[in-house]
Image (cartoon, coloured by chain):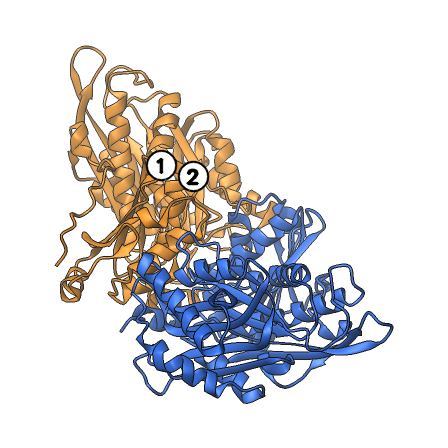
Chain colours: A orange, B blue
Amino acid sequence: MTSFEPLRVPVAPDDAAAFGFAPCEGGVCAAAGVRAAGVSAGFRKNPNRLDLALVVADEPCVAAATFTTNRFCAAPVTVSRAHVADGHARAIVLNSGNANAATGEPGLAAARAACDAVAAELGCDADDVLVASTGVIGVLLDTAPYAAGVPAAVAALSADAAGAHDAACAVMTTDTHPKEVALAGRVPDGRGGEVTVHVGGFVKGSGMIQPNMATMLAVLATDAPLTAEAAAAALRAAVGESFNKVTVDSDTSTNDSCFLLATGAAGGERIGCDSPAYPAVVGALRAACSELARQIAADGEGATKLVTVTVMGAASDADADTVARAIANSPLVKTAIFGHDANWGRVAMAAGKCGVAFDQERVDIDLLGVPVCRAGLTVPMDEDDMLRRFDEPEVAITVDLHAGDACTRVWTCDLTHDYVTINGDYRT
Amino acid sequence: MTSFEPLRVPVAPDDAAAFGFAPCEGGVCAAAGVRAAGVSAGFRKNPNRLDLALVVADEPCVAAATFTTNRFCAAPVTVSRAHVADGHARAIVLNSGNANAATGEPGLAAARAACDAVAAELGCDADDVLVASTGVIGVLLDTAPYAAGVPAAVAALSADAAGAHDAACAVMTTDTHPKEVALAGRVPDGRGGEVTVHVGGFVKGSGMIQPNMATMLAVLATDAPLTAEAAAAALRAAVGESFNKVTVDSDTSTNDSCFLLATGAAGGERIGCDSPAYPAVVGALRAACSELARQIAADGEGATKLVTVTVMGAASDADADTVARAIANSPLVKTAIFGHDANWGRVAMAAGKCGVAFDQERVDIDLLGVPVCRAGLTVPMDEDDMLRRFDEPEVAITVDLHAGDACTRVWTCDLTHDYVTINGDYRT
């Protein structure tokens, strides 16, 4: 029906294979030297749901983290930021059911109490315990569940996939399923040979998702022997192109935290930012984070579609990001996708509303891989073909502004009746 | 239950009475020298719906307008901007059913054809005709309906309330009812006496509403003898505090246009920006625009509540606006209101996410007139009382950042299942 070619997307795929990594089993425990557990401690009303997750390295190890930029940052964010400042940690304790946010001094005391309980049980410094919470905002966190919950979690620690899975389940709130990833690959060992390293992790997140530093709660672990400096740099680089590019509803959480433990158990020389192995480890970490970020968007509250918005031809990276987010967060774009309506006019509206400079007479738009707008004008489309394409679980929106060379992509989901239902009465 | 006093909102009410104005009959035709009509011309598939509105001054008169800032601005915006540049006009022609946006040169030709048709029928210059369109984006506007529609509209022109009402009806899209206003008051006539002047108008708008210059389509008329300079200044001032403070879904239309005709038929000396009568006319215009803006928010697509978000104690006007909009556009805040859930944590989250500097330990929040957060901490509330308050058609959210003296308020609505239904399949 059209003689136009689909747009060619220049964004590099988040392809672990490009760095010699492949999927493996084990979630966060894929990294040697890491054990995990998830137990029901009583933070949630439902005793059948796991609500306390614990991830522990065999020894204190290199650690890095990124946190929310929300001004109303939660107590555990404040405590974890202080505890990870030295680039080392032994354990991460996470709870669901209560975010411990907007809780003032008592909230800080509760977050510290969680660290103390874990430190006492593991025999480590409380400073080496990181803490994260997710759930309702503005309600004091009852610390009583830690008394029995932490010993139970320590007793349940396991280095296999089941322990990782339980930890991933224990941080779920409105998530419909746990979200895990694990990759393995060989990298230079700094001694002329190679060594197998692993990157594994889990994440929770479904609503209040437009992270700015990290997503709600993510735990990554690797057995690569990263230095503290390299771990922080690698995490920052990976998060910037993965968790920071996902948005469910434009709402940035008070609790966003993304942690990385690097045990070094894989062996080999320490990996610094200029080591030959560093690019591969960053690539694998980015691929792992991107996989988790895509899982968040696909499991966005009420979502029926994973939507990838690619904006190219922008005058700057910031412009590309602004336009991509304007499209990804537009309620009219998101409801059109829910309605399987190839309404590209709404994509044009969203691109045009955000203050980024471009010439509307040069804009090209593809929906679901089909050219629908060229040089700002409509391209006739086969509506039946479009409806068939909407049956796929993923929807691609691609815009070329023809205003420069910058490009980005953002993941989101559609806006549905179930989003309204889920969030219309969250506290009851 | 609480010992805290509710926050005292310092924003001046949009009170026409403060300027000696009171509601009157007649809509846009309340202004002497203005006639209006709405007819069914065939722009919409449904022959029972009016779709062509015409507002005509008896003689060419002072005119002013503000337009969308969307980069994808529609053809009628381009044409009207040129035609109003000289500060004068005779008529405004508006259609629903097609936005004539993203339609390139053929779209510009169609918008000019509409002006030509009206000019021929009225015997005036095409340059003195302004044009606006609303409806689907990206579809060429068929100009055939103008051939019979414009003569029919001219024949139907009426100076009474029925003509104004038909015009208001003819621009509706997903609006559930027409939105009109009319005010009358006495102002100094510049000759030592007083003269009665009128401000009347109508607006359409329900979705794709976060105007930035004007709302979708608004027509105001006054018989006050404003100079062209005073008309432009008055409209700019009124729009900035009314239409520019309403948001339904953060989506800025491609077609936003707000027109003002000032016939001068009330008599008296010309009113310039420094005339004694000017403040009263601006006040009445602002009150009229605010009334229409509130009607838009209350009739937001799928809305069950009109929500007024007041932010005070901000460090600057821009900060106040950013925080108010972050709250008003937050899907999580809007769904909580739909669910009658006094979840102030989401208000705190939205305030904190937008990059504005404040100290979370100083923030106070009232919901529905009840203190729910003081100094960043929760205030116990009577949930039954809150549920009763949610029965009212209006919801007030008030935030004091305690970071300065700036203040603003924004109107919005809740996010409901019906919004998703309405927008999930708009084109079919």
Percent position (x, y) of residue A114? 48, 42
Q: Name the quarter where the N terminus of chain B is drawn.
A: bottom right
Q: Are marks 1 and 2 in contact (CB under 8 Å)?
A: yes
- From this view, report whether residue A127 is shown above or below residue A102: above
Percent position (x, y) of residue A206? 35, 54
Q: Residue furthest right?
A: B192
1 or 2: tag closer to the N-terminus: 2
Residue sitting nearer the eye, B387 or A246: A246
- Residue A21 is at least partly visible in this image: no
Indicate left or right for B362 with B259 as reference. Answer: right
Q: Which mark is residue A239?
A: 1
- From this view, report whether residue B353 is shown above or below residue A130: below
Residue sitting nearer the eye, B293 or A292: B293
Amino acid at the residue labelled 1: Val
Amino acid at the residue labelled 2: Met
- From this view, report whether residue A330 is shown above or below residue B382: above
Indicate left or right for A389 with A348 as reference. Answer: left
Q: Name the quarter where the C terminus of chain B is drawn.
A: bottom left
Residue sitting nearer the eye, A212 or A284: A212
Percent position (x, y) of residue A149? 40, 48
How far apart marks 1 and 2 lie (CA) works out to 7 Å
Which residue lies under the disc numbered 2?
A213
**Residue at image location 37% in from the left, 60% down from the top:** B108
